[in-house]
Image: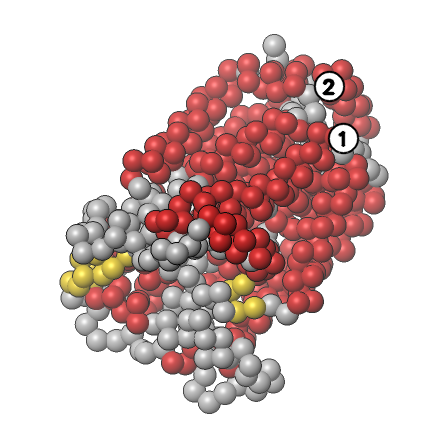
């Protein structure tokens, strides 16, 4: 049976998808690169360990020497630069200590040295990419280059997400959901050396693509969407130990909210979808097998409290809920750089706005799915810790659940868009909300810069003597970051007005699709 009854529906925004991809790629990279320069070396949790793992991977060292450590932690033989990485975090956990305490990176950086890493068993795919700059002449710029490669990977995933979104017939509320999902914390992670970046933005891409396939099935877009799904799955499912679990939850939720199971059946019966679908399944199974066989969830640096009980775990994690929520929105550095409460309210309020639309205008299945995602975002971490606290202790951080939690605003955006609220209303909301997003993103990077230049309690309108500065001029970092977000606001504003002018034949096709959905339900 032809996919979507053979109906190919015209794109309504009039925006060229390839052009949208390249523009989004440039803007996303500029934003993430801004964050890369806005933090000193090793100012993201575990970056020394990730840098060492990456340098080892590109040199063919896939197994660390764990003979003197607990499982998951070991030593690689690497250039001395990567041992220096462990000496650069004098500011970590001390918010009032500016980054001018960091020693200079100089001297012989190439001498082979034993370098520890507690992510020694992580999947090597991501590290094989960000480790490439370490094969060139070594300097302090090596760490920056490795961050920028990570930023480029995540920028590609964001750009592909935008490519899928602009091809929707009703893109405004799904776009709002995507912007709400990309919290300052997500962008900070995406600018750092950590596989959690591809996990987060791979999850976003997979979520958006799957929802586009079931909410707006379009025969002429099936092939491109299917291969975009493969790319997202590769980076998502192979990123970290829990990624395959998040992938499974995501698929279940998408199937639960599919407007038409007949359309899902047509999708699965379309031969063009079989190879990409098989690759996605294979990648997910590979990620799961790697987690099970490699022991990549082992954390060799953790020494659990032997007096800790299961009840203690539950009580402590419930009490920490507000802190976990803050980490999802924006807690930078080694958990020591906090945003003002009013900024957190703006970030959370943006997600709440689109979530309210999703709940108000969706059917019962959509509301149950949204509630399920939120409850899993709170409950799954407790279950994971209950299964591992004897070996790992209480190590959970809110950012670990971002790949799942960010699904909520995206799903809400699709559910509300499917309800066919007037697109002129959606467009007005999107224009205001994205301006708010741009504002709090600029505030977030400014707070981060202030913390490292002057210290969290330092002055705001002067710079202390001998202050740390980014490796490119501070004014350039801020100017490019602000300019990128201004362009985002202008482009989204233009797209929102185009979306209000969708042609009549698209309206008819939408009505036909909704009629099919009703009969299937």
Instruction: Determine whether, in the image, residue 447 is placed left or right of residue 362.
Output: left
Q: How many marks?
A: 2
Image mark for residue 363: 1
Q: Position of residue 234 (x, y in %)?
A: 42, 36
- Residue at x-position 78% and y-position 50%: 429
* Left or right of 480 on screen, residue 240: left
Q: Residue at x 18, y 61 (%)?
A: 114
In 3D space, how far apart are the residues under numbered discs 2 and 1 (Cα atoms)?
Answer: 11 Å
| Residue 380 location (% of width, % of height) | 52, 42
Q: Earlier in the sequence, mark 2 or mark 1?
A: 1
Label 1 neighbour load within 10 Å: few <14, some 14-19, many 20+: some
Q: Is residue 498 visible?
A: no
Q: Quadrant of the C terminus?
A: top right
Cβ atoms at labels 2 and 1 below 8 Å apart: yes
Can residue 274 be spotted in the picture? yes
Residue in the foreground of this view, choosing between 45 and 379: 379
Q: Say whether residue 454 is left or right of residue 138.
A: right
Task: Name above or below for residue 134 compared with residue 72.
Answer: below
Residue located at (76% from left, 34% from top): 362
Give whichever of 260, 507 is nearer the camera.
Answer: 260
The colouring scheme, among rainbow, by chain, secondary structure or one colour, is: secondary structure
Q: Where is residue 193, by image quadrant?
A: bottom left
Within 10 Å of disc 2 (Cα), the crowding (few <14, some 14-19, many 20+) is few
The image quarter containing residue 467 is bottom left
* Residue at 45%, 29% in the rendered image: 280
As displayed, is residue 340 above or below residue 193?
below
Under tag 1, what secondary structure? loop
Label 2: state its secondary structure: loop
Q: Residue 129 appears at what percent x and percent y?
A: 34, 48
Among the 4 quarters of the image, the one containing residue 433: bottom right
Q: Could you say which disc has been placed on residue 521 in the image?
A: 2
Tell me if residue 106 comes above or below residue 44 in the rendering.
below
């Amino acid at each position: 049976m032809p996919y979507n009854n053979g109906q190919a529906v015209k794109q309504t925004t009039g925006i060229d998808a390839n052009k949208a991809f390249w523009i989004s790629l440039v803007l996303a990279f500029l934003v993430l690169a801004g964050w890369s320069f806005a933090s000193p070396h090793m100012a993201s949790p575990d970056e020394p360990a990730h840098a060492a793992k990456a340098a080892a991977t590109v040199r063919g060292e896939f197994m660390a020497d764990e003979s003197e450590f607990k499982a998951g932690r070991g030593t690689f033989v690497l250039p001395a630069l990567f041992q220096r990485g462990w000496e650069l975090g004098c500011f970590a956990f001390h918010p009032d200590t500016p980054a001018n305490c960091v020693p200079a990176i100089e001297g012989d950086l190439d001498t082979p040295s034993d370098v520890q890493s507690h992510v020694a068993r992580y999947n090597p795919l991501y590290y094989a990419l960000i480790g490439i700059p370490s094969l060139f002449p070594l300097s302090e710029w090596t760490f920056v280059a490795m961050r920028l490669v990570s930023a480029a990977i995540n920028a590609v995933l964001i750009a592909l997400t935008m490519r899928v979104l602009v091809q929707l017939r009703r893109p405004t509320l799904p776009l709002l959901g995507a912007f709400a999902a990309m919290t300052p914390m997500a962008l900070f992670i995406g600018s750092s050396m950590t596989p959690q970046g591809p996990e987060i933005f791979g999850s976003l891409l997979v979520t958006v693509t799957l929802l586009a396939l079931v909410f707006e099935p379009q025969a002429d877009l099936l092939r491109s969407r299917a291969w975009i799904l493969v790319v997202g799955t590769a980076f998502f499912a192979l990123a970290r130990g829990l990624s395959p679990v998040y992938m499974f939850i995501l698929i279940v939720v998408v199937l639960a909210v599919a407007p038409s199971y007949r359309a899902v059946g047509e999708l699965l019966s379309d031969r063009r979808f079989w190879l990409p679908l098989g690759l996605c399944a294979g990648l997910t199974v590979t990620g799961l097998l790697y987690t099970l066989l490699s022991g990549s969830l082992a954390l060799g640096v953790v020494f659990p409290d032997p007096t800790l009980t299961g009840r203690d775990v539950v009580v402590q994690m419930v009490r920490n809920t507000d802190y976990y929520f803050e980490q999802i929105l924006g807690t930078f550095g080694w958990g020591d750089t906090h945003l003002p409460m009013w900024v957190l309210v703006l970030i959370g309020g943006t997600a709440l706005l689109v979530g309210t639309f999703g709940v108000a205008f969706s059917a019962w299945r959509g509301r149950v799915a949204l509630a399920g995602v939120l409850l899993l975002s709170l409950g799954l971490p407790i279950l994971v810790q209950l299964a591992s606290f004897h070996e790992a202790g209480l190590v959970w951080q809110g950012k670990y659940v971002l790949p799942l939690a960010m699904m909520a605003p995206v799903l809400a955006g699709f559910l509300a868009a499917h309800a066919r609220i007037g697109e002129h209303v959606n467009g007005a909301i999107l224009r205001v909300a994205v301006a708010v997003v741009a504002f709090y993103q600029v505030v977030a990077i400014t707070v981060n810069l202030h913390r490292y230049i002057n210290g969290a309690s330092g002055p705001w309108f002067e710079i202390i003597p001998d202050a740390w500065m980014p490796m490119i001029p501070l004014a350039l970092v801020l100017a490019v970051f602000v300019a990128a977000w201004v362009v985002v606001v202008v482009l989204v504003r233009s797209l929102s007005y185009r979306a209000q002018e969708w042609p009549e034949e698209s309206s008819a096709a939408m009505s036909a699709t909704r009629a099919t959905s009703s009969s299937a339900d």
